[in-house]
Image (cartoon, grey):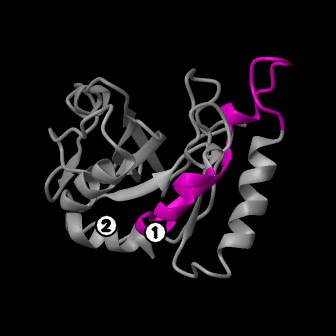
């Protein structure tokens, strides 16, 4: 079942484009802008849409969540500079698909940045796809095991599960349950999601 239910949160993620900005400007349901536009709430559906951006860094892909509407993180910078830019925009830094294609943790040298990130993705629906000779196998299992190991030394490190949907049928196929965040302001939303 791939249904986003009432009370749900859907991340709409830019990738070298402005699909979030385009999505939230579509005609249709009434929506309420959260603070700087890092999220929009649709009361009729009781759904919160949160802005994300998957950023290509020289160390792999990083997911920036909750950055302001109209702001974009620069691609092809160092991982260190990208993490700083996300922090400066009061966003969350998440290592997505850490051991899959373009995964940051495929390079052991990048482990030194773990104290700078808010979370790692422990399950990615797209990273579950295995094509012999083309994609790594067991990347989600490796991410989950690594998270459990790293959490001992990094108690503030969060975990994320996402479908990373590229088609309508994928959206919502992988999900996690979280407490309803406080979205009374952009800062409250980020703090709620971080916690």
Of 8 and 128, the residue lying toward us = 128
Q: Secondary structure at mark 2?
A: helix
Residue at 36% over, 59% down: 92
In the picture, the disc for residue 79 is none
User: Which quadrant is the N terminus positioned in?
Assistant: top right
Residue 192 seen by the camera:
yes
Residue 135 is inside the magenta segment: yes
Position in image of residue 101 (x %, y %): 63, 31
Residue 160 is inside the magenta segment: no
Q: Are marks 2 and 1 in contact (CB under 8 Å)?
A: no
Residue at 20% over, 67% down: 185
Residue under pointer 2: 189
Q: Which residues are magenta?
A: 108-137
Quarter of the image for residue 84 reads bottom left
Of 11 and 82, the residue lying toward us = 82
Of 71 and 21, the residue lying toward us = 71
Badge count: 2
Quarter of the image for residue 147 reads bottom right
**Which circle's residue, 2 or 1, is located before the other in the chain?**
1
Residue under pointer 1: 180
Position in image of residue 113 (x %, y %): 46, 61
Residue at 64% over, 24% down: 169
Residue that sits furthest to the front in the current view: 109
Residue at 68% over, 37% down: 125
Position in image of residue 149 (x %, y %): 74, 71
The answer to whether 170 is drawn above or below residue 110 in the figure is above
User: Which quadrant is the C terminus positioned in?
Assistant: bottom left
- On the picture, is 158 further left or further right than 39? right
Q: Secondary structure at mark 1?
A: loop
Instruction: Give the class, few, some or many, for how many residues have Cα within 10 Å of label 1's Cα (few <14, many ≥20).
Output: few
């Amino acid at each position: 079942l791939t249904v986003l239910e009432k009370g749900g949160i859907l991340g709409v993620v830019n990738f070298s484009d402005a699909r979030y900005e385009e999505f939230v400007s579509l005609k249709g349901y009434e929506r309420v802008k959260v603070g700087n536009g890092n999220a929009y709430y649709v009361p009729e559906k009781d759904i919160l849409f949160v802005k994300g951006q998957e950023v290509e860094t020289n160390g792999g892909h990083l997911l920036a969540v909750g950055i302001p509407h109209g702001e974009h993180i620069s691609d092809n910078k160092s991982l260190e500079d990208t993490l700083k830019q996300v922090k400066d925009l009061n966003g969350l830094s998440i290592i997505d698909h850490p051991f899959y294609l373009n995964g940051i943790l495929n390079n052991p040298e990048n482990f030194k940045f773990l104290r700078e990130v808010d979370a790692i993705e422990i399950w990615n629906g797209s990273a579950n796809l295995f094509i012999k000779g083309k994609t790594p196998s067991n990347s989600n299992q490796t991410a989950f095991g690594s998270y459990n190991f790293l959490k001992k030394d990094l108690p503030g490190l969060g975990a994320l599960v996402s479908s990373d949907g590229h088609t309508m049928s994928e959206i919502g196929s992988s999900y996690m349950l979280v407490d309803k965040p406080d979205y009374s302001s952009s800062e409250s939303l980020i703090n709620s999601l971080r916690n």
